């Protein structure tokens, strides 16, 4: 019996990785030892564990039933108004990030779109709004969302028409979704046999992406994408002819369904708009340049124009070889409040405080937030005496004061526009776009460098930003930042901030056929 001359030792909790490596080692005549380690993920509840153990097809059907039951109160809301709308400009957005004060008054006001809806109304241009409902504390249920949309339609008095994508739920849409899903599931089973047996340089990678394949072709992701496709088809077919459409662009699955059904229904040009900035590492916005060719069979679905809100986003698109003729510059609606902060008297007086005021801006991922907060807790005893710490978590990732007993801090969900004037320095996570808010407001910015990931900060390469990875570096950076005056020039030009919105008005109100 011969023994392999070499042995690979794998220490991992990932069974799929072990299977892939063991198969390769067996082919190459190399020994393989797999030492499992416990994963640190929290334990799931019983129902979630049972759901996770179901075959992908049953998971998909369970997802569909749960979605229908949860969103049924939205069925038909705003559909009558949608079909009779006189508007020729439509927006597709999330029913999320609403302004609380306007919500209480049953007025539509979204932080995604700022003053644009009101500006179009003042110009005599009515608009349609198709909302994708996202549960949050302001609109905690589909039933509440239905009431919100009815209130928006009533208060707008024809100037705006509001409906939800789930407003178009019906038996016909559900039947078509199940029919499409069944056809794709049958085809995927035939393809899976071939894909699973196709090696890559002698290495069978199938164990690594088998779960993702089944989820995308048979499982909940497949069902979700097909439901969105059929809902958008119902919505776009029932909408009167449109001259322009605008949607929040992140290249999520539903956006490709929108692009397909918008064009199939014969509507005019459609514009994708990144509401924040296009970060260099965010691969959702970048494709192989060959994908942008329109001459190939089944080309990548793309908007007619991609709206960029300043020099930062424009440069990112150029670096990614996006077709420059398809780019159009617009104002940064989410960041217009910066006009009031730059060189504002409130900001100047805030910098004159006697004790350090640190604003902590959390991340949308648990991992990045934990790294950020752990470093701050380790540096707590090194901070200047009397320092005050204000924590602004991301809505999707709460931060609890009781989890960090050695930090004296205040947790708030106040808008960042109200917090920036009253801080001397901003401490941000490794990836949050909120770092841009602080930077463009002239606030000194300190950002975490996570040794286990790339530098994902949107301020990477910008002068005046300090990156830290240890407690001592953080405390020193905070001390340095507190001694610096606000620099209102550091973010100039990153965003277009003309409050009169001339670029948006030119794009949407002047004749400009595709």
Image: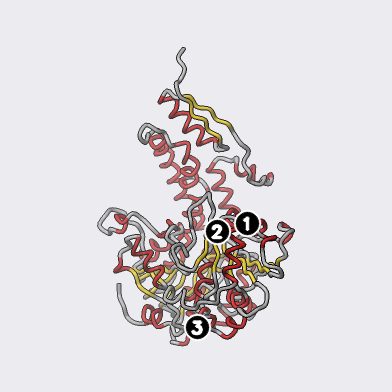
Q: Residues within 10 Å of mark 2 (few under 14, many from 20)?
A: some
Which mark, by number, is residue 283?
none
Q: Earlier in the sequence, mark 3 or mark 1?
A: 3
Residue 112 place in picture, x, y as percent: 51, 72
Residue at which label 2 appears: 468
Q: Image point 58% across, 37% down: which residue?
A: 13
Q: Label 2 near label 1: C-beta < 8 Å?
A: yes
Residue 454 seen by the camera: yes
Identify the secondary structure beneath mark 1: helix
Identify the secondary structure beneath mark 2: strand
Front in this rendered view, residue 10 or 82: 10
- The residue positioned farthest toward the top in the image shown: 1
Residue at which label 1 appears: 375
Q: Nearer the viewer, mark 2 or mark 3?
A: 2
Q: CA distance from mark 2 to mark 3?
A: 42 Å
Q: Earlier in the sequence, mark 2 or mark 3?
A: 3
Residue at which label 3 appears: 118
Q: CA distance from mark 1 to mark 2?
A: 9 Å
Q: Label 3 near label 2: C-beta < 8 Å?
A: no
Image quarter (top left, top right, bottom left or bottom right) of the C terminus: bottom left
Q: Image point 47% across, 65% down: which residue?
A: 459
Residue 176 seen by the camera: no
Q: Residues within 10 Å of mark 3 (few under 14, many from 20)?
A: some
- The figure's colour scheme reads secondary structure
Q: Label 1 near label 3: C-beta < 8 Å?
A: no
Residue 130 place in picture, x, y as percent: 49, 70
Identify the secondary structure beneath mark 3: helix
């Amino acid at each position: 019996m011969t023994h392999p001359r070499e042995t690979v030792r794998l220490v991992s909790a990932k069974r799929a990785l072990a299977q892939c490596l063991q198969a390769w080692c067996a082919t190459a005549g190399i020994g393989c030892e797999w030492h499992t380690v416990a994963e640190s993920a929290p334990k799931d509840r019983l129902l979630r564990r049972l759901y996770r153990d179901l075959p992908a097809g049953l998971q998909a059907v369970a997802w569909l039933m749960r979605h229908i039951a949860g969103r049924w109160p939205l069925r038909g809301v705003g559909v009558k108004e949608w079909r009779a709308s006189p508007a020729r400009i439509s927006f597709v957005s999330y029913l999320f990030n609403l302004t609380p004060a306007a919500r209480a008054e049953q007025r539509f006001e979204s932080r995604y779109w700022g003053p644009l809806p009101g500006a179009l109304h003042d110009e005599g241009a009515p608009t349609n709004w198709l909302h994708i409902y996202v549960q949050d504390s302001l609109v905690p249920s589909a039933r509440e969302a239905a009431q919100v949309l009815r209130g928006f339609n009533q208060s707008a008095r024809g100037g705006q028409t509001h409906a939800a994508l789930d407003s178009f739920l019906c038996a016909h849409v559900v039947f078509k979704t199940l029919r499409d899903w069944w056809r794709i599931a049958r085809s995927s089973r035939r393809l899976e046999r071939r894909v699973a047996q196709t090696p890559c340089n002698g290495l069978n990678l199938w164990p690594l992406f088998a779960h993702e394949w089944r989820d995308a072709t048979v499982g909940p992701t497949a069902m979700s994408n097909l439901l969105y496709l059929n809902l958008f088809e119902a919505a776009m077919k029932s909408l009167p002819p449109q001259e322009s459409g605008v949607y929040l662009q992140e290249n999520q699955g539903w956006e490709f369904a929108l692009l397909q059904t918008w064009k199939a229904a014969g509507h005019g040009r459609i514009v994708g708009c990144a509401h924040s900035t296009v970060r260099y590492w965010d691969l959702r916005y970048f494709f192989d340049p060959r994908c942008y060719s329109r001459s190939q069979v089944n080309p990548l679905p793309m908007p007619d124009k991609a709206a960029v809100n300043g020099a930062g986003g424009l440069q990112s698109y150029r670096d990614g070889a996006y077709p420059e003729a398809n780019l159009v510059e617009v104002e940064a609606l989410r960041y217009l409040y910066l006009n009031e902060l730059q060189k504002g008297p409130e900001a100047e007086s805030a910098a004159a405080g006697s004790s350090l005021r640190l604003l902590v801006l959390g991340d949308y991922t648990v991992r990045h937030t934990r790294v950020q907060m752990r470093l701050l807790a380790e540096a707590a005893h090194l901070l200047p005496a009397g320092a005050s710490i204000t924590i602004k978590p991301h809505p999707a990732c709460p931060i609890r004061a009781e989890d960090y007993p050695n930090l004296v801090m205040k947790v708030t969900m106040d808008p960042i526009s109200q917090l920036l004037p009253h801080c001397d320095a901003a401490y941000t996570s490794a990836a949050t776009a909120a770092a841009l808010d602080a930077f463009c407001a002239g606030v000194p910015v300190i950002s975490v460098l996570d040794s286990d990931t790339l530098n994902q900060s949107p301020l990477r390469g910008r002068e005046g930003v300090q990156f830290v990875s240890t407690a001592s570096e953080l405390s020193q950076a905070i001390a340095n930042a507190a001694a610096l005056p606000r620099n209102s020039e550091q973010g100039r030009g990153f965003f277009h901030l003309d409050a009169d919105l001339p670029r948006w008005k030119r794009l949407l109100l002047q004749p400009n056929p595709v």
